[in-house]
Image: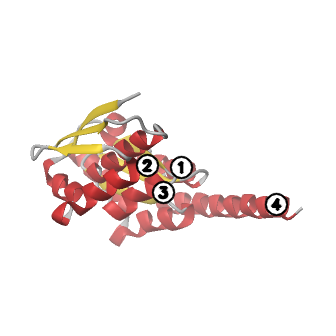
Amino acid sequence: MSFKETIRVPVDRVGVLVGRNGKVRKRIQQLTNVNLDIDPEGIVTISNPVQSEDPILAWKARDIVRAIARGFSPKNALTLIDEDMMLLVISLREVVGTSPNQLKRVSGRIIGENGRTRRAIEQITGTKVTIYGRTVSIIGMNPGLDYARRAIDMLISGAPHSAVYSRLERMRREMNRQEAELWEITDL
């Protein structure tokens, strides 16, 4: 089964996707066995001309391209090659409307003063978060991805930062408890 999909990438992210001397593009192609045709206008065609043993790799390529398009560095986007890693894109426009002031306010709440809130979400949940244009994107694995999503939803809905930090600490304890239980089960 061959795979072909076209994705629009913001023009200012095309250079990041290609990389110096085409390095990022080549790395994506090597890891996922796809061809990337990147137009200077931001039209990216992902195709898998040969029958791949693993068709999931083409979907991973799509997620990596989408992650770079949504503001992630190539290094963070390439972590999506891991089968447990996932990309989640939240459209702020769908949640808060099209008012530029509202979008700016919500983006500022998620980033926090000097990036403090975003860093706290990333550190506690083991995810990477980026705000680009009218979207918030998260790369991670569950349960961290789900916890990061919940924290961001709280911020979008106007919850005080202190309540979000408290909730994140409870999430951290829950993640640590689950990890400890997993280790106990594997030690048996």
Residues under labels 4 and 3: Cα distance?
Answer: 39 Å
Is residue 13 in view?
yes
Structural crowding at the residue carrying mark 3, measured as other residues with C-alpha within 10 Å and reported as few (<14), some (14–19) or many (≥20):
few
Q: Which residue is mark 2?
A: 158
Numbered disc in front, either 4 or 3: 4
Mark 1: amino acid: Glu
User: What colour scheme has been applied to the protein in the rendered image?
Assistant: secondary structure
List the residue tagged with mark 3: 160
Task: Determine the residue positioned at 64% across, 63% down.
Answer: 172
Q: Dot 4 corresponds to which residue?
A: 186
Identify the amino acid type marked 3: Pro
**Mark 3 to mark 2: distance in Å?**
6 Å
Work out whether mark 1 precedes mark 2 in sequence or the reverse, and give the earlier one.
1
The residue closer to the viewer here, 66 or 81, is 81
Gap between marks 4 and 1 measured at Cα: 21 Å
Q: Nearer the viewer, mark 1 or mark 3?
A: 1
Q: Considering only order in the chain, which callout, 1 or 4, is on the residue closer to the N terminus?
A: 1
Residue at 37 percent across and 37 percent down: it is 95
Residue assigned mark 1: 83
Q: Residue at x 37, y 46 (%)?
A: 33
Q: Nearer the viewer, mark 2 or mark 4?
A: 4
Give the secondary structure at mark 4.
helix
Real-space Cα separation, disc 2 to disc 4, in angstroms = 41 Å
Numbered circles on residues, count: 4
Mark 4: which amino acid? Thr
